[in-house]
Image (cartoon, coloured by chain):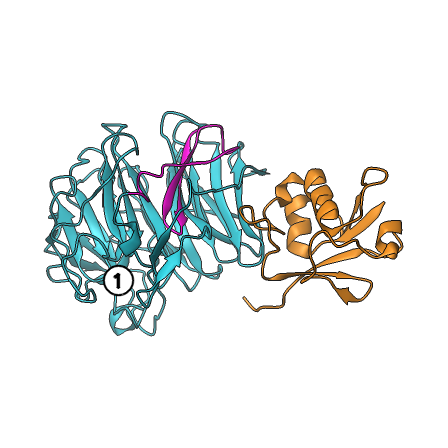
Amino acid sequence: MSNIRLLVGTQKGAFILSADGKRERWEVRGPFFAGWEIYHLKGSPAEPQRIWASQSSGWFGQVIQRSDDGGKTWESVGNEFHYDGVPGTHQWYDGTPHPWEFKRVWHLEPVPEDPDAVYAGVEDAALFLSRDGGGTWQELSGLREHGSGPHWQPGAGGMCLHTILLDPQSRQRMFIAISAAGAFRTEDGGTSWQAINHGLHSDMMPDPEAEVGHCVHRIAMHRSRPDVLFMQKHWDVMRSDDAGDSWREVSGNLPSDFGFAIDVHAHEPETVYVVPIKSDSEHYPPDGKLRVYRSRTGGEEWEPLSRGLPQENCYVNVLRGALSVDSLDPCGIYFGTTGGQVYASRDGGDSWNAIVRDLPRVLSVEVQTL
Amino acid sequence: MIRVVLPVPLRTLAHAPEEVEVELEQGASVTLRAVLDGVEAAYPMLRGTIRDQATRKRRNFLRFFACGEDLSHEGLDLPLPEQIARGDEPLLVVAAIAGG
């Protein structure tokens, strides 16, 4: 029988939640790296006992941890993230130029076929790659030097590269997203990049349809259809059927099209999940009711999923990295909240249970189907 | 032997005791830089956690104290007090109380 391992990053440490394929009884381990912010953990598809963790702190900076035994023991590896050359400036919140400064790693994306290779998406936005098990990191500076960099600006969480999607059918192609610059695609393994934001409309920008500057919160794909991308933008849920060349809005009947998290069902490429949040100033669910919304039509038509979720007085947020799916059948859906709950659905979202209720603020949830 | 007291999160990260010891080469100047280099050599996982990896400057939320004196804003190459060099007093690496 398969096993499920949830890798949960929180503001005060990491937790590992494990269950067998029934997904009924969960073992909770942690906190690991207690007191430190764990923006992201992710397991290597090539070597699932290898797990990467981004450990950071406002006091002590960035540490990268690696486990080779499924999270039992950890070893700190390289943490030197040096931008290539003189990194120049991006826009500050008030539009003035601001020097590029490394702050933290938001996302770690292991290369599926190579356990020693892993990408890191960082703040201030850039993409790094390690090919030696995390010992050293090299910037793929073609992204930052795309030419639009001086026009990128931070979102409320900082100017972060928070999403890395590797095309499972073409290793040379990947997609990344930056708040607040937008989405970018490479076709040559990261040497050169193209902004893929045509069709996005952001009223907060002087030119709402500019090439860059959009606050993309998350993008997701189904591995069988890498040309189809779904996006939760600051406002608007979007869809592209041409690998990001163009986007159209599919917010449809959502109660709010603001949100952070988005993901796709493991076996149904047209089934998409989002968690609507009331607004950019009110980071909690509409009406105090925590509801995941599911579309079985690739957007536009959405149904609320609320069974087992709090339907009154709920004012938590679900952050961009905190929603994931397993690959069992029926598909399991998992998300963590800023209130410290981690909810699980064993039936594609029809019903939910809290695995844990009182963790620190959850920053990310990743699933390993073992 | 030079004694250095680390803040709790760094002790945990380094699997180190409250106070670590650093031995410098005979005749070497006992400066903040030399002592921090020694700490990082003994505990490589602390590289970047006390001084920024890129700038090598002290992290903003850390301070250095020796013999009751705040050395945070002195140059890294300033010789440390004799009591530190002799190991009579520890160099304190202190994390700011900054909420969180």
Q: Nearer the viewer, residue A101 or A53?
A: A101
Q: Quadrant of residue A155?
A: bottom left
| Helix, strand or loop for disc 1 | loop
The residue shown at (80%, 45%) is B29
- Could you tell me if residue A264 is visible in this image? no
B44 on left or right of A195:
right
A247 on left or right of A204:
left
Is A363 rendered above or below residue B21? below
Q: Quadrant of residue A303?
A: bottom left
Determine which residue is flagged by label 1: A291
Q: Quadrant of residue A46?
A: top left
Chain A tint as drawn: cyan
**Chain containing the residue with disc 1:** A
Q: Nearer the viewer, residue A278 or A107?
A: A107
Q: Nearer the viewer, residue A294 or A322?
A: A322
Q: Amino acid at mark 1?
A: Arg
Does residue A94 show up magenta in the picture? no
Q: What quarter of the picture does the C terminus of chain B occupy?
A: bottom right
Q: What quarter of the picture does the N terminus of chain B occupy?
A: top right
Residues drawn in magenta:
A117-145
The residue shown at (40%, 25%) is A114
Is A70 rendered above or below residue B67? above
In percent of width and height, residue A292 lies at: 25, 58
In percent of width and height, residue A60 lies at: 58, 54
| Classed neighbour count for the residue bearing mark 1: other residues with Cα under 10 Å, few (<14), some (14–19), many (≥20) | many
Chain B tint as drawn: orange
In percent of width and height, residue B32 lies at: 73, 51
